[in-house]
Image: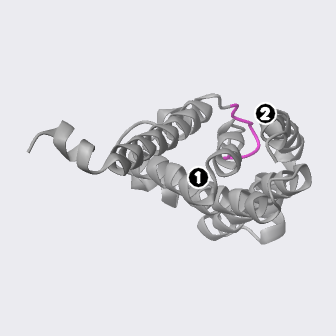
Amino acid sequence: MHIQTIAACNPGLTDRTGEAVNRVIKIMAFTLFTALGAQFAVWLPFTPVPVTMQTLFVVLAGIVLGPRDGFYAMLSYLALGISGAPVFAGLSFGPVVLFGPTGGYLLAFPAAAFLAGYLREIGGGKPAASGLGIISGLILILAVGTAHLSLVTGLSISEACSLAVVPFIMAELVKFLAALFLVAGKWKNN
């Protein structure tokens, strides 16, 4: 049977296929943005955790794509890195990175994207809901990153917090504001 005949018999099929392709392209775009954001890394001498742009793209994935596709984008990012693509900070890769000091941040990415998108969605896409989603996603990443750093290094939670949160507060605030600015156009649709 020819493709045209199938499409003629079921016009909704081509619409669904086009929507699916569009979703996959957007998911892969945010996977790529996150990988690129990882390479904008500033390594601070007093902490094993670099400042990167990844978290900006994590929360934006949830806000822009929605909770499900934001989650899939970050899961795709992790899968690429674990399978050997040099997409983690400093062009690192492999499962060993997840057991290192930055592994907790990475492992939190899918849940943070989902949370950001979910809070925006249940808030009707309003600016306050987007802001709550963005800040909640960023806080989740920092919390899981801190707990993981404490676990892998044997530091107390307060010691890990001084290395995994305190140095990043200003950078995360800037990312929060940048994310709000970047999604401001979405508010006009709601």
C-alpha separation, residue under disc 1 versus residue under disc 2: 16 Å
Residue under pointer 1: 70
Dot 2 falls on a residue whose secondary structure is helix
Query: Extreme left residue here?
Result: 1
Question: What amino acid is at disc 1?
Answer: Gly
Residue sitting at x 51%, y 49%: 73
Q: How is the image coloured?
A: one colour
Instruction: Please state the total of marks drawn on the protein image.
Output: 2
Say which of 112 and 49 sits in front. 112
Q: Is residue 148 above or below residue 166?
A: below
Classify mark 2: residues with Cα within 10 Å, few (<14), some (14-19) or many (20+). Answer: few
Q: Which mark is residue 7?
A: none
Residue 88, given in percent of the width and then of the height, sits at: 51, 41
Residue under pointer 2: 182
Say which of 87 and 157 sits in front. 87
Magenta stretch: includes residue 45: yes
Residue sitting at x 83%, y 43%: 187
